[in-house]
Image: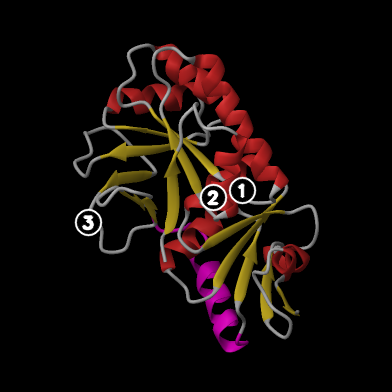
Amino acid sequence: MPKYIAVVNPSMDEDDIARLIRKGIAGALFEISHQNYPMAIKLIQLIKQLSTKYNHPVSIIQDVSNMEDKLDLEVGLKSGVHWVASDKGEHLKMAKGLNKLAGLIFKGRNLPKGIRVDSVLAGNFLDPDAEIIGSEQRQIKHLVDEHPQQSLLDSLLKIAHDAGTHAIAVSDASLARGLSFRRPSRKIIFSTEDPKAAAKAGIYWGVHPVFGNVSALSSARNKNLIQKGQRLVDATEPKHVTIHLA
């Protein structure tokens, strides 16, 4: 099942945002318009605060397609958005220049030459990673190259299958993304102490980011991602992969 992304705006109050997070949205999409920077910053901070309160990482995505002032983008990135989306290549190049860790989403299927992005936002994908709530043809598909540790991915999936486990836990974002691309039948638990990494991974198909201040097994149980009697492959330390019984 794809993840769901809600469109939000600065006029929403705490109850509105909290209701969306409790429903389990993976991402929040918004624009900064009319140079209303204080309200936009307040919105970003509110999403982050409620994400922590409800222990549910949420990807914050800023659409800058209609940007007229570079400051719109700068304000978003400095306030901590995790992804930048646009239908203009120059916007995405600018975003990468300002923050190399920001994820880039191109709106459309026909990528301009010389533009490297992480994902595309369009419609009618056969197997989308995420869908925009309330929009019939707005979906996100992540672009994934062959993983440098492809043999590790193969091994983890084989272990999970042979041991009859219900979930695979990793602490590396690229591993979580690589597993997501494989569309495994097991849940992918991304356990990290970096709240930015957890939130950014929120819109990957099948990935359940958790704040890794406790063990992966405890985090998974606390969020009801694994039930008593189920097994979990713990690869948060890839050199010491273990299998836990909940």
Q: Residues within 10 Å of mark 1 (few under 14, many from 20)?
A: many
Badge 2 marks a residue whose secondary structure is: helix
Q: Residues within 10 Å of mark 3 (few under 14, many from 20)?
A: few
- Give how far apart the Cα atoms at labels 2 and 1 are: 8 Å
Q: Which range is magenta?
A: 145-164
Residue hosting label 1:
57
Kind of residue at badge 3: Asn
| Point 63% across, 29% down: residue | 45
| Point 26% across, 32% down: residue | 87
Badge 1 marks a residue whose secondary structure is: loop
Q: Is residue 146 magenta?
A: yes
Q: Is residue 118 magenta?
A: no
* In this rendering, the label closer to the viewer, 2 or 3: 3
Residue hosting label 2:
201
Q: Quadrant of the N terminus?
A: bottom left
How many badges with numbers are in the image?
A: 3
Q: State if disc 1 and disc 2 touch (CB < 8 Å).
A: yes
Q: State if disc 3 and disc 2 touch (CB < 8 Å).
A: no
As drawn, the label of residue 176 is none
- Give how far apart the Cα atoms at labels 2 and 3 are: 22 Å
Left or right side of 88 for 234 = right
